[in-house]
Image (tube, helix red, strand yellow):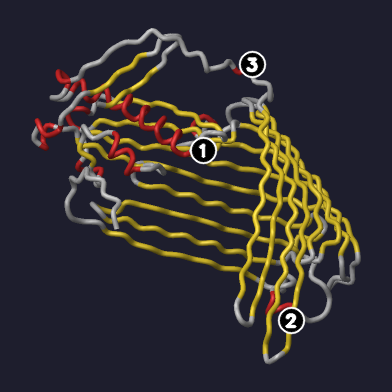
Amino acid sequence: MKYLFLSPRKVHFALFLMFSTTLFSQNDLLKFYIDCRCDKNFVRQEISYVDHVRDQAQANVQLFIYDITNGMGGRSYTLDFKGVGNLGSITKELTYDTSANMTSDVVRKGLVKKIAAGLLPYLLESGMGDRITYSVSTEETLDKKNEDDDPWNSWIFEINGQTNLHKESSRRSFDYVIGFETDRITEKWRIRTDLQVNQANSRFIRDDEEFTSRRERYFGYGSIVRSLSDHWSAGIFGGASYDTYTNLDLSMNITPAIEYNIFPYREVLKREIVFAYKIGFAYNDYIETTIFGEDMESRFQHSMDVQVRFRQPWGSVYSRIRASSFLEDFTKNRFQFYSSLSVRLIKGLSARLTSNFELIRDQVNLPAGSASLEDVLLQQKQIATDFQLRTGVGLSYTFGSAFNNIINTRL
């Protein structure tokens, strides 16, 4: 017996579906395909009155779930149901919001209830429609509060920390990170701050010679962004940092920015093409004199970002291009390109591609002189480079039984 709870306005509808799958042949059940970043095993276990298929071409009900971080520190899910064949006229979209204090079990149970609610119209139109039993409850929801009663006024706070220890006969490393973040998101405003302390100690022994290093990084960043319309936003970013790896004794910057999204922001879960331009001022005080003979300097810099993201039934694509330079010297610049692509090619066959490429011409912070062996072995300081490249390619092909609702987690 499965229970489904809906709550339109002040009335709770408790709908439960009583199915014994052993009474029906396999062809009587809905063939259901789901694409999501969720616990699919739990979904199959809890919603056992449909056939879960692994190929969307074999399904007569398809569900694509898109998710994104929300203002409560959790995630907002959009459930996009699509019927196929005789059920092609039925489409449905539901939303489900989680908060930071919800456990993963609470999240997955809530998501399953939403999935069951979305399947109901398809069940009513299928051969199982006359086998559905439901009841209506008029109990009030007492624990759901209006946003006006929020004592935190939409602010989210997070304290985090992590430590790592790695030891071998000739190598030892220890590091820790402590951070504090705040976030406030409303329809019009997005306010963020991020503070972090990071230290890393390393030791390496080679031919009875010992090399040690200590890397430290402290930084604080903040931003305020205002929504101007369905397509435009404007904001200001600022921060300060100390970083021994990048030769910065003190770095401060302030950068206004403006952004335009070709599609309305409400469609961001499925698609977006965004252009962002930033122009600002930076002050750097260096630990060691740089390769340009500077102990401290002030610079104006600007950048243009273009981001493209699509999440569709055929797969997903994300690309970002960023070009930046100093205003007083365009020869000192950087170009970055990142892309990830996942595409369903044919039945059972999917392709994945990731790439990250950077052309680097703006390392004005590098200390003068050549890098020591200790710096190279322990990655204690940033080393000069003209480019960085990382790529990855993958294929996956799945074949075999298309119908298997059994959950078995044994060894």
Horizontal and vertical percent position of residue 277:
68, 44
Residue tagged 1: 68
Closer to the camera in the image, 408 or 368:
408
Q: Earlier in the sequence, mark 1 or mark 3?
A: 1
Q: Residue furthest front?
A: 410
- Please identify the quarter of the rendering in which residue 244 is found: bottom right
Horizontal and vertical percent position of residue 61:
25, 33
Q: Amino acid at mark 2?
A: Phe
Compared with 405, 295 (above or below) is below
Q: Earlier in the sequence, mark 1 or mark 2?
A: 1
Q: Is residue 302 left or right of residue 408?
A: right
Compared with 91, 149 (above or below) is above
Q: Amino acid at mark 3?
A: Asp
Q: Is residue 396 left or right of residue 212?
A: left
- Report crowding for label 2: few under 14, some 14 to 19, many 20 or more residues within 10 A (C-alpha): some
Residue tagged 3: 149
Closer to the camera in the image, 281 or 90:
90
- Please identify the quarter of the rendering in which residue 188 is found: top right
